[in-house]
Structures are given as C-alpha cells and as structure tokens.
Amino acid sequence: MVRCVNCDREYEHEHELDHEVVDEVELVEQDDGPPRMQIGVDSHDVWRCKGCGKVLGVR
C-alpha cells in the first residue's frame, strides 16, 4: 500500500495512481562553458497522487 505524505491518501494498487511517461532531463558538463541540459535522453514512468499530484514513484 502506498500513502501520500502530502495529503494522506492511501492507494492499494498502482492503477489507482495517475501515471505518465516523461522524458529524462540530463545535465551535461562541458569543459569550455556552462553545463547544458539534454532532454529526451531516456523516458521514465512517473506515478502521482490523484489527490494532490505529488510524485510517489519513478521508474
């Protein structure tokens, strides 16, 4: 069982959570300047609380 510490809702199954696939954001260090962000390197599953939207898990 998963409990959201933000709004105290409890979920028994993963299908009760909001689910989305998001692109990974990666910071790439460069020798000759400031680091740059690279978006879409990989994608991850994100589960959010349906009550408040807090991220409860990422895979």
Image (spheres, grey):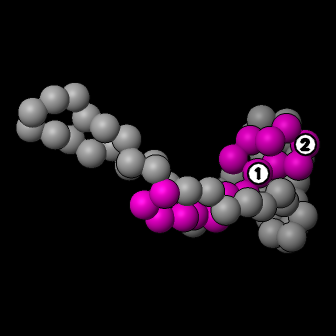
- When asked about the image quadrant of residue 47, the answer is bottom right
Q: Which of 6 and 23 is in front in this view?
A: 23
Quadrant for the C terminus in the image: bottom right
Q: Residue 48 carries which label?
A: 1
State yes or no: discs 1 and 2 in contact (Cβ < 8 Å).
Answer: no
- When asked about the image quadrant of residue 33, the answer is top left
Q: Which of 1 and 44 is in front in this view?
A: 44
Q: Is residue 39 magenta?
A: no
The residue positioned farthest toward the left in the image shown: 31
| Residue 58 seen by the camera | no
Q: Looking at the picture, which amino acid does disc 1 mark?
A: Arg
- Left or right: where 34 falls relative to 50: left
Spatial CA span between label 1 and label 2: 9 Å
- Left or right: where 7 falls relative to 42: right
The residue wearing badge 2 is 51
Quadrant for the N terminus in the image: bottom right
* Magenta stretch, main secondary structure class: strand
| Range covered by the magenta-colored residues | 40-55
Give residue 20's position: percent from left, percent from top. 73, 60
